[in-house]
């Protein structure tokens, strides 16, 4: 039974892939598997869209896309965020709290 990560690979290619982490340059199918193993959902079409928008690090070798393992690893780390530590989220929480407090203050003063 083949693993889910190899679902896009032809059977002959998946048998000879070996350890992706030992490779420096990855093809498209290997890059998808690499990214998925790091917890980021990825399809072939999504990868192509990201490369077209230049949102993911890649190089071209003729007509083929080539992905650098260290660059792709760094990109993956940048995609994973902690929502509780997001600076934008923290600012939003503080602003909403201040607005609620200001609303309470204004309502109290108008009732007097």
Image: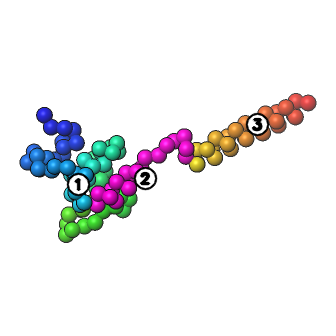
Secondary structure type for disc 3: helix
Mark 2 surroundings: few (<14), some (14-19) or many (≥20) residues within 10 A = few
Q: Earlier in the sequence, mark 3 or mark 1?
A: 1
Q: Is residue 44 visible?
A: no
48 shown above or below 83: below
User: Between residues 5 and 97, which one lies in front from this camera angle?
Assistant: 5
Q: Is residue 81 visible?
A: yes
In the image, taking residue 27 as reference, residue 52 lies left or right, namely right
Secondary structure type for disc 1: helix
Q: Nearer the viewer, mark 3 or mark 2?
A: 2
- Percent across and percent down for residue 93 are 64, 41
Secondary structure type for disc 2: helix
Q: Earlier in the sequence, mark 1 or mark 2?
A: 1
- Which residue, as the protein is rendered here, is positioned at the far bottom? 62
In the image, taking residue 96 as reference, residue 55 lies left or right, namely left
CB atoms of marks 3 and 1 within 8 Å: no
**Residue identified by numbered label 2:** 78
Q: Which residue range is magenta in the image? A: 68-86
User: Between residues 94 and 100, which one lies in front from this camera angle?
Assistant: 94
- Percent across and percent down for residue 16 are 11, 50
Give me the disc on residue 111. Answer: none
Q: Quadrant of the C terminus?
A: top right
Q: Quadrant of the N terminus?
A: top left
Q: Nearer the viewer, mark 1 or mark 2?
A: 1
Cα separation between marks 3 and 1: 56 Å
Q: Residue at x 20, y 49 (%)?
A: 19
Q: Nearer the viewer, mark 3 or mark 1?
A: 1
- Which residue, as the protein is rendered here, is positioned at the far front? 22
**Residue identified by numbered label 1:** 22
Mark 1 surroundings: few (<14), some (14-19) or many (≥20) residues within 10 A = few
**Residue identified by numbered label 3:** 101
Q: Residue at x 43, y 52 (%)?
A: 78
């Amino acid at each position: 039974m083949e693993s889910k990560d190899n679902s896009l690979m032809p059977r002959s290619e998946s048998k000879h892939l070996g350890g992706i982490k030992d490779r420096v340059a990855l093809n498209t199918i290997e890059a998808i598997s690499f990214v998925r193993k790091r917890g980021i959902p990825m399809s072939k079409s999504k990868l192509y869209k990201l490369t077209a928008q230049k949102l993911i690090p890649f190089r071209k070798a003729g007509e083929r896309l080539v992905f650098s393992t260290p660059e792709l690893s760094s990109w993956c780390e940048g995609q994973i965020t902690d929502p509780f530590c997001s600076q934008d989220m923290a600012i939003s929480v503080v602003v909403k709290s201040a607005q609620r407090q200001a609303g309470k203050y204004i309502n109290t003063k108008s009732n007097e």
